[in-house]
Amino acid sequence: MAIQETPVARRLKTVKHVVIVLSGKGGVGKSSVSAQLALSLHASSPNVRVGILDVDLTGPSIPRMLGLDGHGVHQSSDGWVPVYADAKSGGEPRLACMSVGFLLKNRGDSVVWRGPKKNAMIRQFLSDVRWGELDYLVIDTPPGTSDEHLSLMEHLAPVQSKLSAVIVTTPQAVALLDAMKCLSFTRAVSLPVLGLVENMSGYVCPCCGEVSNVFSTGGGEEMARREKLTFLGSMPVDTELVTLLDAAESDRKNGGDDDNAASAEAEARSFELLQRYQATSSAKLFSTITAEVTRAVAAGMAKESGGEPPESG
């Protein structure tokens, strides 16, 4: 099926897959799952190019999690230039990030926008950012199913065949109830679901290794089984990961020379973050989830084209 030539379709023509990360409820770790998915995809191959778009306009947390607080967005003749988390890696950067957090004068400023302005911002993110060639564009969304989600699906309609979703929940009953509403949304807008991640599934004591089921366990897996979804895996609370993503903040100072120094320091820190993330137990667990996501994406593309999915290695 030919892709309609809209500004968004033209911009995303060189993006192979768009993975939208959803959660019905706030506080389930959706943004940390989005950040881990982007980092894990980046680490999966030296040739994979990944973008992460933060459309949680009132609570943008991806810049801080990737150590990119304090960066601004630069305009080029071909649109906005995303911030690259691995800009100082020594090679060609492969992890692009865009967020409303890069547009705020002070990171503590609130974003008080009505629906039309949110809609315009999402359209601009999709049509005006110079993403270039990407294998995956991961989109971190706000919790629930609101204006941002409807705007996102409206603007991405011309590239519907590239879209899929991952749903994040915790095992507790209230989160699962909201995850069901999220699943209902995907079905209403014909958005294929790659699978479900059960986050905060137990807490591993860093001293003795004993697992405590803080929010019960297994609810996400049971929901996936009942709704015939792929269960991508469960992720326990990892204090090492929490500390890593919280400490990824980079301070920005005022003044021209100080701005340049802070930006260079942030870039160096962010690449260190990629290396430190790969050393965590979460990264090892999440690599399995990422492998399942890439397999499901490949299977979906094969189904779309009428072929057979490649065998997973």
Image (spheres, rainbow, N blue to C red):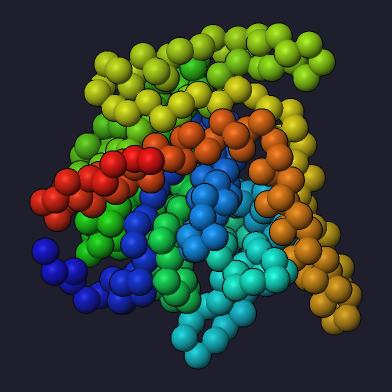
Question: Of all residues shown, which one is farthest toward the bottom?
Answer: 77
Which one is nearer the viewer's eye here, 303 or 265?
Answer: 303
Image vertical order of residue 55 relative to residue 178, above or below: below
- On the image, the x and y values in percent for residue 207 come to 82, 15
In percent of the image, x 26 and y 32: which residue is there?
184
**Quarter of the rendering containing residue 292:** top left
Is 212 left, or right, of 223 in this rendering? right
> Looking at the figure, which quarter contains the C terminus?
top left
Which one is nearer the viewer's eye here, 184 or 246?
Answer: 246
In percent of the image, x 39 and y 50: which residue is there?
19
> Looking at the figure, which quarter contains the N terminus?
bottom left
Image vertical order of residue 139 relative to residue 2, above or below: above
Image vertical order of residue 255 relative to residue 221, above or below: below
In percent of the image, x 73 and y 13: which residue is there?
209
Residue 134 visible, this angle: yes
Is 245 left, or right, of 11 in this rendering? right
* Count of picture labels: 0
In percent of the image, x 75 and y 41: which residue is there?
244
- On the image, the x and y values in percent for residue 202 come to 60, 15
Residue 70 visible, this angle: no
Is 270 left, or right, of 303 in this rendering? right
- On the image, the x and y values in percent for residue 277 come to 68, 44
**Quarter of the rendering containing residue 72:** bottom right
